[in-house]
Image (cartoon, coloured by chain):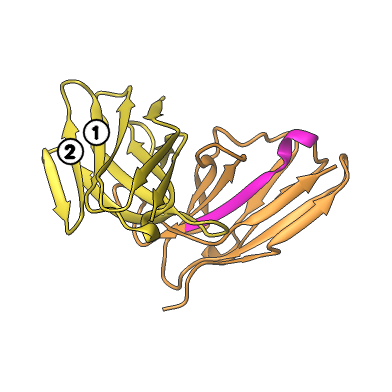
Chain colours: A orange, B yellow
Amino acid sequence: EAGVAQSPRYKIIEKRQSVAFWCNPISGHATLYWYQQILGQGPKLLIQFQNNGVVDDSQLPKDRFSAERLKGVDSTLKIQPAKLEDSAVYLCASSRGSGATGELFFGEGSRLTVL
Amino acid sequence: GENVEQHPSTLSVQEGDSAVIKCTYSDSASNYFPWYKQELGKGPQLIIDIRSNVGEKKDQRIAVTLNKTAKHFSLHITETQPEDSAVYFCAAMGTGRRALTFGSGTRLQVQP
């Protein structure tokens, strides 16, 4: 079974520029998550989708971050404009069911550096 | 919302020794507590989990204990090996949300 795919693996941009990350979850997984992991910290949830609907985006900085999951499969996370504090690894994860008490399968992440 | 605190932030042990990592959580209604292992350049991977109706769970050299009264849970690794070296995260599922809240991580180094 193929794992969660993410791209790009690395991205370097200057502040105020925009960036987009792509995620392809494990086939058949209904729930998709984007987590932000700042160096030395645990992952922090940005947004959770179930199929193509948003379950939780309470911690997403909506003035600069946006995410979509078209057709309930792939997802894109966008940052515009980027700030220095957005430097982090952006992890995509998926789970089979609704996400309640089930295993999360993580991708390898997209490392963003904002200069 | 849920808040998870994890200690220690770093832990160094000799190969063959045991390692213990502790976490506390704030939401008394939380009912699911997984542990994830993250190797360098990789995403976190589930190693063991425990639900609130169980006090202890073992899987070979790894065990997790849960004290709901005190709102803390711990990861125990026995007979540590160099390949156990990684960052370990605890997490909890709080009420009102269907996503995990993670601790800040523990970097475990097993010295050969």
Is B78 on the left-hand or right-hand side of A20?
A: left
Magenta stretch holds residue B9: no
Residue type at mark 1 is: Phe
Name the quadrant containing residue A64: top right
In the picture, measured across the screen, residue A69 lies left or right of residue B77, that is right
Q: Residue beneath label 2, please?
A: B65
| Residue sitting at x 31%, y 24% | B27
Image coords of residue A27 (percent x, y):
45, 73
From the image, give the main secondary structure of the stretch colored magenta: strand
**Residue at left offset 69%, top offset 58%:** A21
In the rendering, at what x and y percent does residue A69 appear? 59, 58
Seen at 83% across and 40% down, the residue is: A81
| Amino acid type, residue under disc 2 in the picture | Thr
Q: Quadrant of residue B47?
A: bottom left
Give the magenta part as a residue range. A84-93
Where residue A101 is drawn, which disc sits there?
Answer: none
- Locate the C terminus of chain B by quadrant: bottom left
Which residue is tagged 1? B73
Relative horizontal placement of residue B33, taking residue A113 as reference (left or right): left
Where disc 2 sits, the SS reads strand
Nearer the N terminus, badge 1 or badge 2? 2
Within the image, what quadrant is residue A22 found in? bottom right
Quarter of the image for the N terminus of chain B: give it: top left
